[in-house]
Amino acid sequence: MADQSITATATIFASLIAAGISFLTLTLSKEQKISDFRQAWIDGLREDLAIWFSSARSMARATEERQLDEAQAAKAKFLLSEDQIRATRVMSAQAYYKIKLRLNSGEEQHIQLVTLIDQAINLQNATAKGESDGSKTIPAIEAAFEFSRSVLKTEWERVKDGEPRFRFAITWIPPILILLGLGYALLNHCLT
């Protein structure tokens, strides 16, 4: 009778250990896939932000130079052609909408980044319409750029730390398996 009890207990214990290890393996595998996807998302966001910032800065400079008189314009070395301006505007618009699609409209940091980008765009548009001298456009672009770095850092920290379910599994499953092992050993000792 004691042998049957030990065998039954060992079978139950082995099943629990196997289930715990399977769950931990599944969680680790899923976490790795999520981390890979999130890293690709971060890389894509970084690329779109770089395109938008460089395009916005180029457009700001081109707009400033259009406001120069002929003598000053002749000295300017940056001047963009109409075709270059159109291409830059298209590239900027594409990057802007990619950024907006990548960001989560429910996260405060993401909302704030879009707000800063929109402020830079509004300043750029006001300058293009002659409603502003353009002196605030590049500082607004730089403010959005600096803030984007904190968004990217936050997202990187999220990848590094892992998803909450992963942290739970990695924190609690191994100790539970150890406790089950100790419990089995104690029970086995008591039954023999």
Image (cartoon, grey):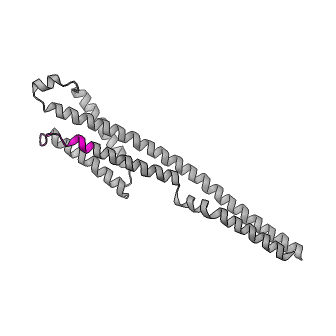
Can you give x and y, in whole percent of width and height, for residue 78 in the image?
A: 23, 26
Q: In this view, does 58 lie to the left or right of 4?
A: left
Question: Seen in the image, is 74 located left or right of residue 56?
Answer: left
Residue 39 picture location, percent across and down: 49, 46
Q: Quadrant of residue 106?
A: bottom left
Give the residue drawn at x 61%, y 54%: 28
Q: Give the total number of marks visible in the rendering.
A: 0
Q: In this view, does 145 lie above or below 112?
A: above
Asked if residue 73 lies in the magenta stretch, the reply is no
Overall secondary structure of the magenta stretch?
loop
| In-front residue for pair 125/169 | 169
Q: Is residue 133 magenta?
A: yes
- As drawn, 152 above or below 184: above
In the current view of this chain or complex, which residue is farthest to the top? 74
Q: Position of residue 159 (x, y in %)?
A: 50, 51
In the figure, is residue 111 to the left or right of 4? left
User: Against 31, is 71 above or below?
Assistant: above
Q: In this rendering, is residue 163 above or below 7?
A: above
Work out whether residue 34 or residue 50 is closer to the camera in this orientation and state it.
50
Quadrant placement of the N terminus: bottom right
> What segment is highlighted magenta in the picture?
129-141
Q: Which residue is drawn at 72% across and 68% down?
A: 180
